[in-house]
Image (cartoon, rainbow, N blue to C red):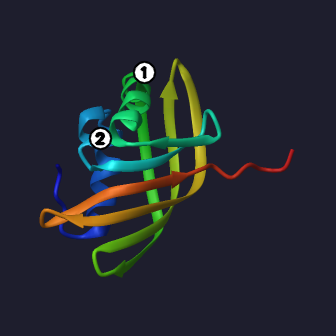
Amino acid sequence: MNAMSVPADLVSAFFAALDRLDADGVISFMAEDMVAVDETTNGWIRGRAAVAAVWVPMVESMTSVSSQIDELAVHEFGETAMVTCRLRQTYVIHAVETRIDAPTTFVLRRAGGGWQIVLFHSVPVGTAA
């Protein structure tokens, strides 16, 4: 487990690991009962192992990622925190560059002196054609 004592620091470290293409680092922030939206199937991935099975190969197929987060807001409710932000990200996967602008939500749970991700929800907002 990658314990962070401040929710905003965990979110920043999560995206820093992703930008380094460190798949294991990204997964290390997740709780065992992690849930994430799966943008490719328009469904949910439930459980850290299932998320890792989807995300690790995806991160390993990327050649670059650059994530910018702003509009960050943190709301703590005892042992739970909700972090919302706007994610602006550029990545190259399978030699195709993609740019996204996505409202993003993390739900965190306090565990072992730090925080773990229990929900990651980020879906790019489409633009009118």
- Residue 4, percent across and down? 19, 62
Task: Say the numbered circle drawn on residue 27.
Answer: 2
Rounded to the nearest angstrom, the CA distance separating label 1 from label 2 is: 16 Å
**83, above or below 129, in the image:** below
Instruction: Quadrant for residue 46, please give it.
Output: top left
Q: The C terminus appears in which quarter of the rendering?
A: top right
Task: Identify the residue at image location x=77%, y=50%.
Answer: 127
Q: Identify residue type, mark 1.
A: Ser
- Residue 27, percent across and down? 29, 41
Task: Identify the residue at image location x=30%, y=47%.
Answer: 16
Residue 38 appears in the rendering: no
**125, above or below 99, in the image:** below
Q: Residues within 10 Å of mark 2 (few under 14, many from 20)?
A: many
- Residue 124, percent across and down? 63, 49
**95, above or below 118, in the image:** above
Residue 16 appears in the rendering: yes
Residue matched to label 1: 61
Q: Identify residue type, mark 2.
A: Ile
